[in-house]
């Protein structure tokens, strides 16, 4: 297949990346500035302020962008906050929880797992049962994209608050579209990916780091093995404005525009929008035989709608036919392949227009 620039009308309904916000798209092509220019530091400080609002870590929490995708956000947490031999409790009820466990292990952690069956949320009581004085960090994915499950982060955070452990939260499918209150909950490290709920281009991982996490970092016995995202280097650039590496300035332009647009819309308005869209889609698809994969309503992740396919449904064939009509829909992963569709409702995909296109084409194909 040759790449042809004919995708202006392509509809992305995947669990990321999401369609770029028009304001971000415009900002992306602004003339280049240098990463050490005062205008860029002014832009960065607006991004930091807006990220504080998004993560709920006002007025003084530390926020920044890492030059990489959500996985770099994940990796930076373990690289900076874990040392060989540390005991880390990872909540793993899907692919991204397992990715956290693998990363923690690569940085030398002794990993203990709290699991739940696929399609079910982690039970806080199971976390409590594993939490003891030896645990130095608890890590949990807020929205498990692989199954469309929302894990009970506030309840888990309450348990962790009373222990000496740090709490790392993967907010990749939640921050900017779901309630997230870092300070109030007592989260120490959170990250997302620019291409998810904010509809900015991929390539940036917005992170928030608590003072407790910085203290843990300062007390390390060894240097972090990941130079690129060393917390000190990060603070040097974002706070002291000294060179660490060349940040992708054009991506910062676009991210700034997308995040501004999100906050102008309002975080609560976005939460209401995703819920309304979810209800409309599930009601429209129910008569075709689609049903919720996640059984308990309170375990359902609003931003990734996991729907069980109707009996005898040609999953691969239909997604291929939709693809030819410029609509991307994502199926299941591993054990849920051929069993579910995962419809993205993050950022600009949670709009009536793109889903109207899907319904029209589906009706035609199934007709
Ligand atoms: N964590 C979660 C919950 C995700 O959904 C994803 C990507 O889909 C990631 C981490 C990894 O993000 P990226 O693909 O941007 O590296």
Image (cartoon, rainbow, N blue to C red):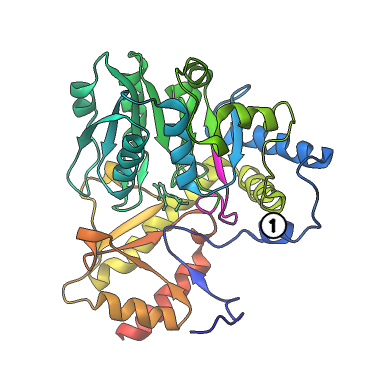
Q: Is residue 84 magenta?
A: no
Tell me which secondary structure the magenta stretch mostly adopts. Answer: loop
Image point (43%, 54%), residue name: 276
Locate residue 49: give its quadrant: top right
Does residue 3 appear in this view? yes
Q: Where is residue 197? Give x, y as percent.
A: 51, 50
Give the magenta-colored segment's residue range.
Answer: 195-206
Q: Where is residue 199? Give x, y as percent.
A: 56, 55
Residue 12 vs 320, above or below: the answer is above
Locate residue 337: give its quadrant: bottom left
Looking at the image, which is closer to me, 297 or 326? Answer: 326
Looking at the image, which is closer to me, 166 or 51? Answer: 166
Image point (55%, 63%), residue name: 19
Q: Classify the position of the C terminus by image quarter.
A: bottom left
Image point (30%, 49%), residue name: 95
| Residue holding disc 1 | 23
Looking at the image, which is closer to me, 56 or 361? Answer: 56
Q: Where is residue 117? Give x, y as percent.
A: 17, 45
Q: Is residue 200 magenta?
A: yes
Looking at the image, which is closer to me, 98 or 156? Answer: 98
Q: Where is residue 64? Give x, y as percent.
A: 61, 35
Image point (58%, 82%), residue name: 4
Does residue 180 appear in this view? no
């Amino acid at each position: 297949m040759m790449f042809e620039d004919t995708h202006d009308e392509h509809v992305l309904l995947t669990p990321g990346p999401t369609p770029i916000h028009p304001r971000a798209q415009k900002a992306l092509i602004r003339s280049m500035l240098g990463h050490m220019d005062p205008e860029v530091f002014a832009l960065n400080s607006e991004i930091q302020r807006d990220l504080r609002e998004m993560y709920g870590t006002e007025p003084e929490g530390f926020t920044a962008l890492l030059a990489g995708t959500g996985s770099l956000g994940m990796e930076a947490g373990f690289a900076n906050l874990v040392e060989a031999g540390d005991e880390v409790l990872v909540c793993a009820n899907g692919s991204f929880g397992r990715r956290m466990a693998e990363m923690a292990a690569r940085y030398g952690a002794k990993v203990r797992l709290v699991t739940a069956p696929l399609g079910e949320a982690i039970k806080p009581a199971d976390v409590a049962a594993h939490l003891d004085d030896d645990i130095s960090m608890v890590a949990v994915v807020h929205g498990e994209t692989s199954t469309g499950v929302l894990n009970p982060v506030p309840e888990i955070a309450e348990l962790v608050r009373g222990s000496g452990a740090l709490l790392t939260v993967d907010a990749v499918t939640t921050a900017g579209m779901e309630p997230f209150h870092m300070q109030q909950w007592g989260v120490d490290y959170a990250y997302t990916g620019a291409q998810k709920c904010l509809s900015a281009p991929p390539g940036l991982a917005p992170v928030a780091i608590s003072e407790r996490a910085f203290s843990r970092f300062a007390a390390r016995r060894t240097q972090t093995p990941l130079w690129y995202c060393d917390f000190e280097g990060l603070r040097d650039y974002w706070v002291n404005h000294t060179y660490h590496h060349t940040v992708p300035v054009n991506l910062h332009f676009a991210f700034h525009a997308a995040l501004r647009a999100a906050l102008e819309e309002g975080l609560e308005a976005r939460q209401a929008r995703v819920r309304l869209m979810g209800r409309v889609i599930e009601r429209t698809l129910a008569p075709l035989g689609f049903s919720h994969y996640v059984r308990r309503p309170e375990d359902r992740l609003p931003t990734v709608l996991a729907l069980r396919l109707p009996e005898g449904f040609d999953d691969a064939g239909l997604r291929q036919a939709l693809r030819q009509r410029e609509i991307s829909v994502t199926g299941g992963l591993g054990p849920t392949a051929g069993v579910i569709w995962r419809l993205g409702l993050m950022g600009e995909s949670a709009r009536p227009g793109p889903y109207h296109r899907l319904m029209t084409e589906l009706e035609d194909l199934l007709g």
